[in-house]
Structures are given as C-alpha cells and as structure tokens.
Image: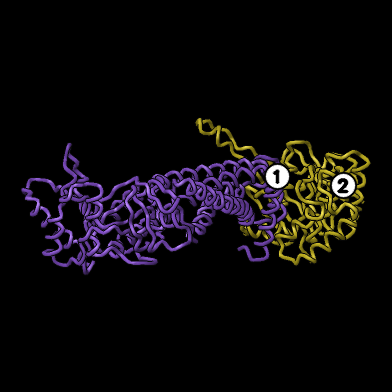
Chain colours: A yellow, B purple
Amino acid sequence: MSFPAIHLSGITKSYSHLAEKKNGDDIPDIEVLKGITLDIGQGEFIALQGTSGSGKSTLLHIIGLLDRPTAGVYEVLGQDTSILDDDRQSDLRNQSLGFIFQSFYLIPYATALENVILPGLYSGKPRSELQARAEFLLEQVGLSDRLDFKPSRLSGGQQQRVAMARALLNEPDIILADEPTGQLDSSTSSEIIKLFHVVHEMGRTIVLVTHDEEVASAADRIIKLHDGLIAEDILKG
Amino acid sequence: MIGPRLGSRIAGMGLGAIWAFKLRSFFVVLGVAFGIASLTLIVTAVDGANRKAMEMVEMFGPDAALVFGGNFMKRAVNMRTLTLSREDARRIKESLPGTYQVIPMRARGGQTIKAGNKNYQDVLIIGATANYAEAWNWPLVEGRDITDDDDELGAKVALLGDKPARELFGDESPVGRVIYITNIPFQVVGRLSYRGFSGGGGSDIDNRIIIPLSTLLQRYNLDRKYFRALRVKFHEPDYMDAHTDNLRSLLRHLHNLQPEEDDDFTILTADEILKFLAMFKGGLTIFLGVTATIALLVGGFVLANLFSISVSERAEEIGLKKALGAHNSAILFQFLVEACALTLLGGVLGLFLGLGLGQFLSRLDILVIQFSWKAFFMALAGSQAVGLIFGLKPAKLAADLDPIQALRGEG
C-alpha cells in the first residue's frame, strides 16, 4: 500500500454571504481554509490543533466527507473524492471512516448495543455477525454489562466508549475524532485517550481535533492550524 | 437502491422511532383515524343507499307502474287527488297494449285489529282487486291471494302481512282464522312473506292487511267510483318508456285533459324511483365526500406538521446517520415508513371507528350502511395516500439536511 491514508493538496474552503450580497454590496467570501496541503500516512496518529476559527473543524469535516472543499484535491486511501457522488461518499464514510464526536450523538431511544450496530445496518452485513462484533467491541471498551442500557443510563465516559465501539464496528481504516474529551473530566478523558492508543496500535489512522495540550500530546504528530493555513507540523520522535 | 435487507432494517428503525415518539405517533394516528372513519362511513353509507335503492326497485318491480291521483310535481291548491276511477282501470285493462294486470287500490291507515283476546293497533288496511301479491312481486308463504270472486262478492277475507300475522298469531298459521277489523270479522286466507324493509321513520312495509277493494269501500262507506292508486303491470319491461307514454296518453284522454293542462295524476315507475334516489344519493355523496376529504386533509396536515417538527427535533439523529454512511434515500425511506406505518394504524382504527359509527347511525335509523371490501381497501388506500403525500415533504426535508448543520442540531 503505497498511497497515504489521506492526501490533501491545495484545499480551500470559502463561504459566500448570499444574504448580505443581495444589497449589492461587494462583501468578499469568507475563506476558512486557504490552501491546505498535507499527507497523513497509514497508521499515523495525528492531533489537529488551532484556535477557534482556525479552520480545524472545517478541515476535519472535509476529511470526513461531510463537507466538500471549494478547491483542491482530496484523496482518501488513494481514492479521489471529487469524482464520487453523494451515495459513494456515504459508502466510503460507512466502510472506511469512523466518527467520534464531542457530544457522543448516541440515539437516545436505542440501547448501547443497538447504537453500536447502527453503522453495520447500512452496510448489508448479516445481523448475527454485526451482533457478535458489537458485543465484542463493547466488551473491549469495558461495557459488556451495559449492552441493554439506554444512553440516558450511562455516564459521559461510558457514552463516549459506546461511540468509540460504534466507530469501530465496520473496521474502518481511519478514525476521525472531534474534541472527543471535550465534555469529559480529566480522569475520564485519560481513559478515553488510552482507548485511542489501543485503536492506534491495531494499525488504524487517527485524526483527532483537540485544543487540550494533554490530549494532543498522545499523538505522534501535531498539526497546528492558524487562520486557514498549517502553521506548525510537529513530528514527535 | 434500497434492497430487501436494508429496507427491512430501515423499516425496523422507523418502527422503533414510532414507539420512541409515542405522543407524536398518537396524534398522527388519531388525526388520520378521524379522516378514514369519515371515508369509511361515506363508502358504507353510499353502498347502503345503493342497496336500499336496488331493494326498492326490486320490490317495486321493473315491469310495473304505479299511478296516483293528483299531480305530485305541480300540486295546485285544492287540486283533486281522487281522479282515478274504476272506469279508468277498466279501460286501461281493456285497451292499453302490453298490460296484463291492472289493480286499483285504496287504503285506510291506523286501524285496530283483533283476534281472540289479542289487540293490535295502527295497521294499514289496503283494498285491492285480485292478485295483489302477484302484482307486487310479493310471494305468499301460505294460503291464497285475493281473487276476482272475493272482490265481486265483497267477501270478508283478508291477506295478512307478516307483522300483524306474528302479532296476532305468533308462530301459528293464521290461515282459516278470523280477525276483527274495527269489529267486522274477516277470514284470513293467506299470509304475505316477510320483506323486512323499513322506509325510514318507523313505517314498516310488513305492517299491512289486504282485503278486497269492494269490501273496503262498502265497510268504510267510501266513494265507490274513485280510488287512490292504480297498479299496472306490463309485459316486456324493456319497453317501459313506451308503456308509460301510452298510459299517460290514455289517462289524459280519459280525463279529457286539454294539451295546455297538466296531468291530474302521477305515474311512478322503477326508473323514476331510481332517478329520485340517485338525486338523493348524489347529495349524500357530495356532502359526505366533502366532509371526508376535509377530515382526511386535516389528518394529513396534522401528520405533515408533526413530522416537520420531528425532523427538527431529530436533526442530530439524522446527521449522525448520514455521518455513519446512510444514503439520503435511506433517511427518506425511514421517514416515509414512519409516516405510512402510522397512517396505516390510523386507517385500521378509522375503519373500525367508521364502521362502529355507521352501525350506531343505522341502529338509530338515520343511515343504512353496507360493509364491503371496497370500504376496507379504500380505507387502507386512503391512509397510505395520506402517509405518502403528507409524509413526503418532511421526509425529503430530513433526507436533504446538511449533515454538519444537522449534527449541530440545526434541522
């Protein structure tokens, strides 16, 4: 496998202010990303840092195929994403990308097990296989006694662990995490970071957005964004 | 495309959401149920009206006409209603082509009859000439019809309808027994079969006794020349239009009516009855149809509104599912499944609600209802149409959500 997990070249993203432009004023588009060129190798653990407004969330959304760049080339696992239609992008999200969010986003009326199975339901794998895999993953994150619990009966740390199990269900190559410890206290967040290490050791590529230095220090490589450009790219020895 | 496995999984998610959002589900089901209930009521009521119309026509006979004295359509003040004479009847029988029965009739309502120690009040007594039962296509269960001899002799014989026969004699045969009509003894010679047709408003067609016309006229001291109605039966019902035209011409001639004068009689045929019923039914259909449409629309708007709110409330769920790889079509399908499952439930509930209401109204003699599979299928089809039409917009709204905005909860 010679291609990088993620290849970004000259990625820009602008938002136009259509509403204000109606008045005839020439308000320039807001450019959130101003040309990001970046290769992330397979198996790398990256922390994406930056102040708010630096464009780190936008970049993560583009990497996660939730948003399209205004210009530039984005290849994920050697696949040029610009030629993919919405459904193919959905399939790629389903098969190759795993998302972990700051506020967990578990479905409140479904059990922990059902939440973990969810991405598998869209994949077409047989139910028995999904069930076994979900139970295995929940055991790995230490929740084998909470399979039938609804999210409201789980603590924040437990909810995030369910979300991590869900992200791993379809065995994606890349895990994308957006402030995964943002709503957790420090002891819970260090448990979550430990899990990220485990996931990393399994050979997965991880891109983690955080503003927490301690969390960032868990990564092999720290990329700092400033004003829509890469300001620093620190590879730890 | 959504295959069967993915389809059933998404449907499962939809059913889960229906259970999870119980209040929304409850209101949608209720809203749709009212609409479907009205639809069911209208379909069964129109079918009931149809059946009743067919029964009436069947009973009346497609080969018969009923002539009344007086003009129903242009009822002038003081117009005579006793315009049909025995002479008219004789002439029609002799000279109108195609006729084979002409039976003049008069009636006295509200008579009290007696048999043994039993009294029965408020019976309609009809005086008719021979072959009354045959003329009305009304089979006898036992005994015989009125004959020419009975009428010529003014015999005190009676043909009992089902109601007085049961009231006076129960399960026993009335034939050969004696009844007293206002203290005059009559011998029962026959019994008409049960027709079980109520004309609405409590009048019962089986509540009648037929005696020879001449007997009625003598006993009640009625005018001997004129009678109230005339039953005419024709060969070849295919030519009913021509028969009625001939009958009208003949009667106008016999009554010496000038061309500018209106008829002083009214001819009723099965066709006329059908026309009248169609008019009545048309009114009923339009009224109930408009009501049912409005009720269905209200149900549809309730659904569309609650689902739009639901899409906003569940924006995070929708955004998440997209992030996890759900195609837009999968989101669309899930919301359509939710809408159609709820309207199906509402449809079934509405079907029973409508049938129950119909039963209730028919018990009260307000409506006649007739259940058919048509009502069943229309309820199901109607509910699914509401689900698809009014569920489509919110479902598209959900499918087209931008995943990033949706995850921020901005539905």
**Tag 1 near tag 2, CB within 8 Å:** no
Residue B164 in sight from this viewpoint = yes
Q: Residue furthest right?
A: A187
Percent across and percent down for residue A181 are: 85, 42
Q: Quadrant of residue B213?
A: bottom left
Q: B184 or B352: nearer the eye?
A: B184
Residue B79's x, y, as percent? 16, 40
Q: Residues within 10 Å of mark 1 (few under 14, many from 20)?
A: many
- Say which residue appears at 43% left-offset and 48% top-offset: B119
Q: Secondary structure at mark 1?
A: helix
Amino acid, disc 2:
Gln
Q: Quadrant of residue B210?
A: bottom left
Q: Quadrant of the N terminus of chain B?
A: bottom right
In the image, B183: left or right of B103? right
Structural crowding at the residue carrying mark 2, measured as other residues with C-alpha within 10 Å and reported as few (<14), some (14–19) or many (≥20) = many
Q: Secondary structure at mark 2?
A: helix
Taking depth in this image into account, of B375 and B69 the one nearest to the observer is B69
Q: Residue at x 68, y 54 (%)?
A: B15
Q: Amino acid at mark 1?
A: Glu
Along the viewing direction, whichever of B299 and A13 lies nearer the viewer = B299
Q: Which residue is mark 2?
A: A158
Q: How far apart are the two marked residues, 1 and 2, measured between alpha carbons?
A: 19 Å
Write down the chain letter for disc 2.
Answer: A
Disc 1: which residue: B316
How far across and down, in percent of the image, does residue A2 sit?
A: 78, 65
| Chain of the residue displaying label 1 | B
Residue at point 79% right, 63% down?
A: A130
Left or right: residue B10 versus residue B237 is right
Labels 1 and 2 in the same subunit: no
Rendered location of residue A57, percent (x, y): 74, 43
Describe residue B196's horizontal placement relative to residue A144 as left or right.
Answer: left
Name the mark on residue A194. Answer: none
